[in-house]
Image: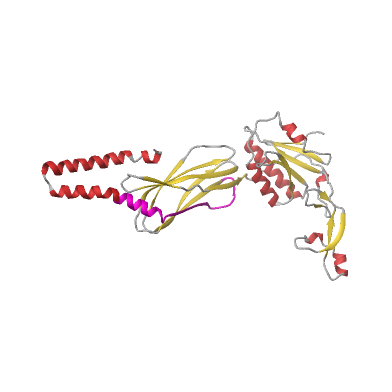
Amino acid sequence: MQRNSVKNIPYIIAYSSGLILILLAAVFYRQPLLSVFFVLLTAMIPLSIFILRYSIRYLSFDISTDMARYVLPCTINVRLKVKNPLLFPLLNCQLNYSFENMYYPCERINELSFAMEGRCDKTVTIPVVVTKAGMFVLKCDGIFLTDMLHFVTIKIVFDKNLRSPVFPEETRISVPKLSSGLQDEEETVWTDEGNMTSDIRQFREYRAGDRIRDIHWKLTAFRDEIIVKEYEKGKEFYHVLCPILDTDRLQDTVTTFYALCRYILNLGMIAKCMINDPDNGEYGLFPLIDEDDLEEIMLRLFKIPVYQIPDKTDRIHAGSVTDESRLVCIHGKDITVPSV
């Protein structure tokens, strides 16, 4: 028996006891009105259950958040939209859900009770105050509807899950001196392979998707078509930003890493971020070029399981650093550049 059905037991006992008392009074005192009253109350039971089962076929539910992404400090407003096109009200409705930060798993089930009046189309808002950065996941465990007399509870499958990233607020950090080799020159670009190059392989006609900065204006002026520069695959010195996620300094690490990435973007510097791939569990390097890259990197970071340091950290990261790169470790509020 489900937990929500167990809640109906006191109501069933109380209603049944009332019926028995009315029946006894009708029999011993020979009151016709009590007999009619008993019949009406008894008929209410199947009628209440019928209204519930009939209404379920026409109900609709949807759940969403008011924003796609959030920045601390914030309140996530979860909106449950319910629609009941029928005249019959359903006053005993309950949504079971869990709301957790993926960094801090929580199995606690929350309950939201609400009513659906006849011909209603309304939104129920659940405000959730958030104080820590990460990927927040809302999991719905179903909607439970109970008839007016609390005799039957029916569960509607509603397993929609929502994910809302919460980014740390921007803070000022102390950044160690980074090599000037990170500076992006005007004619230095990222190749499709994720490397840097300034060597031109050939000149060719413009294709859809080519950048304006790659247009060779002098050649274009002498021809009737637009000519662009195509670059060779090359290498350029860059820094590898590596956030070390442990349980003790997790939020400080995320905040400092985010601030450092924004600092690098604002200076037009070249860097890659070492982020765990949630699909296969392996570490990969992801270029940090613009705001879109930073958002994608943070979304990946929010999905990484927290681990205990520092025993395996050096071994994990050593294989991804080459002669053309320098490792930058972010742990808590500390930013360190290990000597090679």
Q: Residue at x 70, y 50 (%)?
A: 293
Residue 215 coordinates in the image, percent (x, y): 82, 62
- Quick check: 340 left or right of 174? right
**Circle count:** 0
Q: Is residue 63 magenta?
A: yes
> How was this image coloured?
secondary structure
Q: Which residues are magenta?
A: 47-73
Decide if residue 174 is in sight here: no
Where, quadrant-wise, is the C terminus in this rendering? Answer: top right
Residue 282, quarter of the rendered image: top right
Image height check: is 323 above or below 199?
above
Residue 214 coordinates in the image, percent (x, y): 81, 59
Q: Residue at x 39, y 41 (%)?
A: 4
- Quick check: 310 left or right of 149? right
Q: Residue at x 67, y 44 (%)?
A: 258
Q: Is residue 22 magenta?
A: no
- Quick check: 34 left or right of 46? left
Where, quadrant-wise, is the N terminus in this rendering? Answer: top left
Is residue 198 or residue 280 the one in the foreground?
Answer: 280
Residue 289 coordinates in the image, percent (x, y): 74, 50
Is residue 339 or residue 97 the one in the foreground?
Answer: 97
Image height check: is 261 above or below 217?
above
Q: Residue furthest top?
A: 311
Residue 69 coordinates in the image, percent (x, y): 59, 50
Is residue 185 or residue 155 the one in the foreground?
Answer: 155
Decide if residue 157 is in sight here: yes
